[in-house]
Image (cartoon, coloured by chain):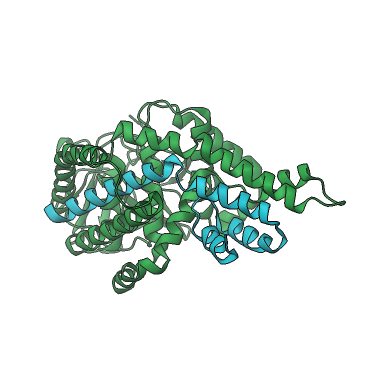
Amino acid sequence: MVEKKDALPAPDERAKLVGNIQEQLKSLKDVIGATSKKEDDAGETNETNEQAQENAILAAANSLVDAYKAAKDKLGSSDKAFDAIEEVMETTIQVGSEGEKMLHALVDDTSIRSTEDLASLAGKIEASHLTTEEEVVAQYLKNLNSTPLEKLEDRITKVLTGEKAGPLLEKLDKIGIEPKVIIGLLMNGIMSYMEKFTVLGPKFVKMLADQRFKQEESSLEGEVLTKYNANKKEFENQWRVAYQKWAKTEKKRAIDRPSLLEMVSPTVVVKKPEVVVGAAEAGSNNPILVPESGNPVSVKFEKGLLLNQKALTYGGSSFDVRDENTLITKVVPNTDISKTGIVFAVAGIEQTIVVSALVNNVKKVTAENEFTIESTDIKLKKRTDDSSTKKT
Amino acid sequence: MEITAVQALIQESHILTDAERVYWTKSLVKMTPDQMQKLVDILTKAQDIPWTKQVSNYFNLIAKSAKSAVARS
């Protein structure tokens, strides 16, 4: 995904946009349901299944690009546009029975049998005095067999980089997006769509876990990747256990989905707050981050939130917030659009926590024991009192 | 079936990954007519596996949602 580096939009503007999209999609849900039914009732068309699928993939990608462009024009940055689209895809596309059909269809007997038949055919062709048929079959299944989701990703990639995708590719080029970004959005949407089911059987969990793990693994880089490679098996097991546990939860919220990055390197990860903050409810005892001099960004925290401690905690690690070298370097959007990431630089390494209720133009509060954001570099000011260590 | 038609079928098949496409394209020269027919049968049958339609439905849904979000925002 694109690096997040733009300043945040005004919260009211942001909330308005999110609310707008959510409202639209809520009312759209019924329309979609009705349209899908009509299409089903209309029966077969002249298109083959494959052509229909290819056209559907192209249409979806085109619409996503248009949605991205419109969101970017409104929100002003790529990241915010992607966040808004992902939010829409993760929270509003829920057509239970259709999704369930797709889930079952992806791992249906015909698909499995096709792969087995291909492996068996390979065995007949390749078997020789050096290799038995069984060995070739086993080798085929090991080396060439893919999960249905991998096949699907492959299919999407093929369509979106193929001949018919010419106009789409031109459009993407004009707005500076690579096809893989759109492929990623589509795959992420599909997985979220399937993960929504309350009860996922073991084979579905495994299929989704395999694909998610691949996605998680590919997001690692630099020192984190080195650390991961040194203990790969253990990290993978740890992640898979956590994913299985998450898949059994009823809500399966995207924000709670286990992160491999977090497991490998808790100190560089965006972490959820322990308390969701409502700025308006913040009382006089609350630690408050305010701009010292004309900085438009300010953050209010409810009493007892992470910052109301000696140390700021995230991902099981912590650092001393009283350290003069602790700087808030930037404020970034989060996948969950109602929250905001605050990036701190500690000893030169950036670390992020996620808080909710970013507000603009909060008046400076002069009570003691406040955290203060100073100037555009947003410095976390040393506290004058360290007695407050409670946590809600 | 002509070998070029089989090659096209391999290239277009959505149940094959790129690695499989390479494998089967390379294997064509070693195959007997019966084996080639078997491959054609498998790939033709796979064109109608259920997820093809379900996936189309999903993408149609995405397209409609995205379009509507743009139109009304």
Residue at 61% over, 52% down? B37
Left or right of A379 on screen, residue A120: right
Dividing the picture into quarters, in which one does residue A184 lie? bottom left
For the point 52% across and 58% down, the residue is: B9
Judged left or right of residue B4, residue A36 is left
Q: Is residue A261 visible?
A: no
Please tell me the colour of chain A.
green
The answer to whether residue A100 is visible is yes
**Residue B63, image x, y percentages:** 26, 52
Q: Nearer the viewer, residue A104 or A76?
A: A104
Near-viewer residue (A146 or A119): A119
Name the outermost residue toward the right.
A129
In the rendered image, residue A352, in percent from the top left (x then y), is placed at 39, 50
Counting from the top left corner in percent of width and height, residue A129 is at 87, 51
Q: Quadrant of residue A174?
A: bottom left
The quadrant of the image that shows the C terminus of chain B is: bottom left
The letter of the cyan chain is B
